Image (tube, rainbow, N blue to C red):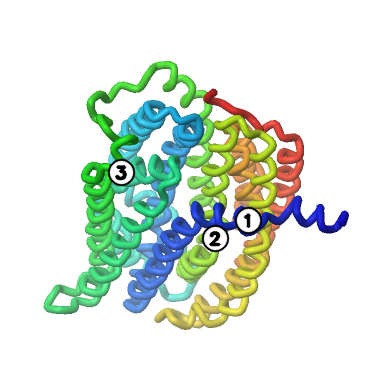
């Protein structure tokens, strides 16, 4: 009986997993489909040479910082959006949307200016000779052309994220999923046409990949706008959304206090990841190519724990907003176990697939060897990453964004980056043991996360 009660503590019943999957499965499908198509896109660019693949990969490192900063900006307001929805306050949800849209467009303006003025310099930071024969000048040229075309798609991306996050705050995950899937299908088709020059189109290589992505951004935001403003079932949320662009000063102050650490965290974390990849790139262009293969493939396997983290923020946030503190704690514990157990299985699948994935690419044997090793390391730490990710979103659901700031980005800059920088610049350690040393620091992060969860300071209603 005691064993049975312990199982009930960590594992839910059929109704529980049905509820969790109703929220998380559309996100898993959307993110999984998006990452699968990204893998196909990556393979297409990889088929035309290491230099074009590396140039695109470096530019995408920069866009990752922008994308995750936008995510951090809308997520700060989403803490309130989810809890307002749990409270039944529709005007509160609308005000959080207005805040998201204004902030996203402001961040887009800053990013566009930065990439226009310093794009070439930022790409050059990743170009280091390794004696493998890679042409750094050509890689830089491909990266620049890709980056400048991609700038056109930043505004529709920012708008789509503002709408999609608000829909998810209210439990509506199917529309963002459908729009995302349609966008990646468009991206896939146009990538094939424009990269290789099919159906009479010119063969544009890396530039064609950028054009295809921009087209898909407009398709995604177009589908969301038509669905949201053209169907009555979204009227109670978005009705009169543009009758005013004002956001109550009290709410702005609340979001600023709670959301600024989250925005700073996402920006600094993504910049930290880009910095760590720059440290890895010191080992040469072959490592840049291998990291691109490894990160694109592993992202496909990571979608489950990434999506379950977002589901934790939504479900637990709504329960906290509704005043159901003990239910939120129970839900959170079971969702964390579910995420970790799922990644034990997925990590095994990734380990099995690791030797096969790099052979899809038209690249050198050394690049394939490095990519395989990186994938094996990633597979071994996937359950650990699942726990850390779930811990982060648990603390975020209760508005503990300063703690998440310390837990996430400060940890990267104080622990992970110094390890990567020191190994890259003061030793001759090969990339595989170097990467293993860097990710091993996350075991310390997991211990910290466990302690923070046990203290339950995140169990807090911040709207009612």
412 displayed left or right of 134: right
Whether residue 117 is visible here, answered yes or no, is no
Q: Which tag is nearer the camera, tag 1 or tag 3?
A: 3
Quarter of the rendering occupied by the N terminus: bottom right
Identity of the residue drawn at 54% across and 37% down: 318
Q: Which tag is nearer the camera, tag 2 or tag 1?
A: 2
**Label 3: element kind:** helix
Label 3: which residue?
A: 233
Task: Write down the quadrant of residue 7 in the picture.
Answer: bottom right
What is the distance, in whole Å, between disc 2 and disc 3 at their CAs? 29 Å
117 displayed left or right of 369: left
Identity of the residue drawn at 75% across and 47% down: 447
Identity of the residue drawn at 42% across and 55% down: 61
Q: Look at the numbered discs 2 and 3 and tell me whether their residues touch, using CB distance below 8 Å.
A: no
Residue 288 place in picture, x, y as percent: 47, 65
Q: Look at the numbered discs 2 and 1 and tell me whether their residues touch, using CB distance below 8 Å.
A: yes
Residue 33 place in picture, x, y as percent: 41, 65
Q: Which mark is residue 386?
A: 1
What is the distance, in whole Å, between disc 1 and disc 3 at their CAs? 35 Å
Front residue of 210/143: it is 210
Q: Say which label, 1 or 3, has the lower sequence index.
A: 3
Front residue of 97/122: it is 97
Residue 420 position (above or below residue 367): above
Q: Say which label, 2 or 3, has the lower sequence index.
A: 3
Q: Which tag is nearer the camera, tag 2 or tag 3?
A: 3
Identity of the residue drawn at 39% across and 40% down: 166
Residue 231 place in picture, x, y as percent: 25, 45
Label 2: which residue?
A: 304
* Crowd rating for badge 3 (residues with CA inside 10 Å; few <14, some 14–19, many 20+): few
């Amino acid at each position: 009986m005691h064993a049975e009660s312990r199982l009930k503590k960590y594992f839910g019943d059929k109704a529980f997993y049905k509820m969790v999957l109703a929220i998380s499965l559309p996100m898993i499908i959307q993110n999984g489909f998006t990452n699968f198509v990204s893998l196909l896109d990556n393979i297409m660019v990889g088929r035309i040479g290491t230099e074009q693949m590396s140039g695109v990969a470096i530019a995408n490192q920069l866009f990752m910082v922008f994308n995750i900063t936008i995510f951090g900006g809308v997520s700060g307001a989403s803490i309130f959006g989810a809890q307002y929805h749990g409270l039944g306050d529709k005007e509160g949800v609308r005000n959080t949307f207005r805040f998201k849209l204004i902030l996203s467009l402001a961040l887009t303006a800053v990013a566009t200016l930065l990439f226009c003025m310093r794009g070439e310099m930022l790409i050059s930071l990743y170009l280091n000779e390794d004696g493998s024969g890679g042409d750094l000048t050509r890689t830089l040229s491909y990266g620049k052309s890709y980056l400048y075309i991609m700038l056109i798609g930043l505004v529709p991306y920012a708008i789509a994220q503002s709408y999609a996050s608000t829909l998810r705050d209210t439990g509506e995950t199917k529309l963002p999923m459908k729009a995302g899937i349609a966008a990646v299908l468009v991206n896939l088709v146009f990538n094939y046409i424009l990269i290789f020059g099919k159906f009479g189109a010119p063969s544009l290589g890396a530039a064609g990949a950028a054009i295809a992505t921009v087209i898909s951004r407009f398709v995604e935001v177009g589908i969301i706008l038509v669905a949201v403003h053209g169907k009555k079932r979204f009227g109670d949320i978005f009705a009169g959304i543009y009758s005013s662009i004002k956001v109550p000063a009290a709410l702005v102050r609340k979001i600023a206090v709670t959301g600024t650490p989250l925005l700073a965290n996402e920006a600094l974390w993504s910049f930290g990841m880009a910095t760590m990849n720059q440290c890895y790139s010191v080992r040469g262009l072959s490592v840049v190519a291998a990291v691109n293969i490894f990160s694109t493939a592993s992202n496909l396997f990571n979608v489950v724990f990434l999506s379950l983290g977002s589901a934790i923020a939504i479900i637990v946030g709504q329960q906290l907003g509704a005043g159901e503190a003990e239910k939120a704690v129970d839900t959170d514990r079971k969702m964390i176990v579910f995420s970790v157990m799922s990644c034990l299985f997925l990590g095994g699948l990734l380990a099995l697939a690791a030797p096969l994935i790099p052979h899809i690419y038209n690249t050198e044997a050394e690049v394939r060897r490095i990519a395989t090793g990186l994938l094996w390391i990633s597979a071994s730490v996937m359950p650990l990453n699942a726990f850390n990710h779930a811990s982060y979103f648990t603390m975020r659901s209760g508005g503990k964004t300063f703690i998440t700031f310390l837990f996430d980005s400060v940890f990267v800059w104080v622990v992970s980056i110094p390890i990567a920088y020191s190994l890259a610049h003061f030793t001759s350690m090969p990339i595989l043991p170097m990467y293993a040393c860097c990710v091993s620091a996350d075991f310390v992060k997991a211990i910290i996360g466990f302690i923070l969860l046990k203290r339950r300071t995140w169990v807090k209603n911040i709207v009612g």
